[in-house]
Image (cartoon, rainbow, N blue to C red):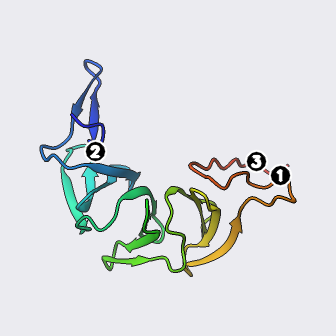
Amino acid sequence: SAASDVYKRQYKNGMFSKIGEKQIMTQSIAPYDQTHLLVTHQDSISLLNMNTLEQKSVYEINNTFQISSLFYDNKGEVLWIGTSTDGLFYLDMQKKSLLPFLDFPKQPIGVITESSDSTLLVGIDGQGVWELDKDKKKVLNILKEDIDNPFSLRGDGVYDICLLYTSPS
């Protein structure tokens, strides 16, 4: 079976078994709530119930693009979708409307993560880290390599972001 399918682990015997009968390539997975995952396939975005393993399509994408990363903003009910060659999109889950984030690089998006209640950090291969305002849908800051600053982001290839928080003294 393909490495791009979704599997569950059977705790009784430590084995993995495939979820679903359809042979569709899974592109990306993101948490939705306590009992569901958002799962993107080449043709649709689905909600997977982790208890029943039932999937329900929430939006058809019909091979529009290759999804490389996801982030679900629970508060805003928006699914942020990074692609391999088509830039960044956002899906309003209530209105079921998918829109492109304007003036965004069309290079592989490696990671989308929340940095505060109002901002996202997006790591782009060859374009550094872009800080976005989630509500206004605009770019706040771009972190890239600066040859005059040895502490800047070297190489601009960003595939993951780990945020470390410290508690105030």
Disc 1 marks which amino acid?
Answer: Phe
Q: Does 22 sit left or right of 143 as displayed?
A: left
Q: Which residue is mark 3?
A: 166
Residue in view at x 69 percent, y 52 percent = 155
The residue wearing badge 1 is: 151
| 31 is higher (above) or lower (below) than 85 | above
Q: Residue at x 85, y 49 (%)?
A: 169
Left or right: 160 in relation to 95: right
Please determine whether, in this image, residue 87 is positioned above or below residue 4.
below
- Give the CA distance from mark 1 to mark 3: 21 Å
Distance (Cα) linking label 3 and label 2: 33 Å
Badge 1 density bin: few <14, some 14–19, many ≥20, Cα 10 Å: few
Q: Residue 23, how many percent across, how many down? A: 16, 46
Q: First in sequence, mark 1 or 2: give its number.
A: 2
The answer to which of marks 1 and 3 sits earlier in the sequence is 1
Residue 121 lies in quadrant: bottom right
Picture quarter containing residue 64?
bottom left
Three-letter code for the amino acid on which mark 2 is drawn: Met
Cβ–Cβ below 8 Å for labels 1 and 2?
Answer: no
In the rendering, at what x and y percent does residue 82 appear?
A: 45, 62
Please state which of the two labelled residues, at mark 1 or mark 3, is closer to the viewer: 1
Instruction: Give the quadrant of the N terminus.
Output: top left
**Residue situated furthest left in the rendering:** 21
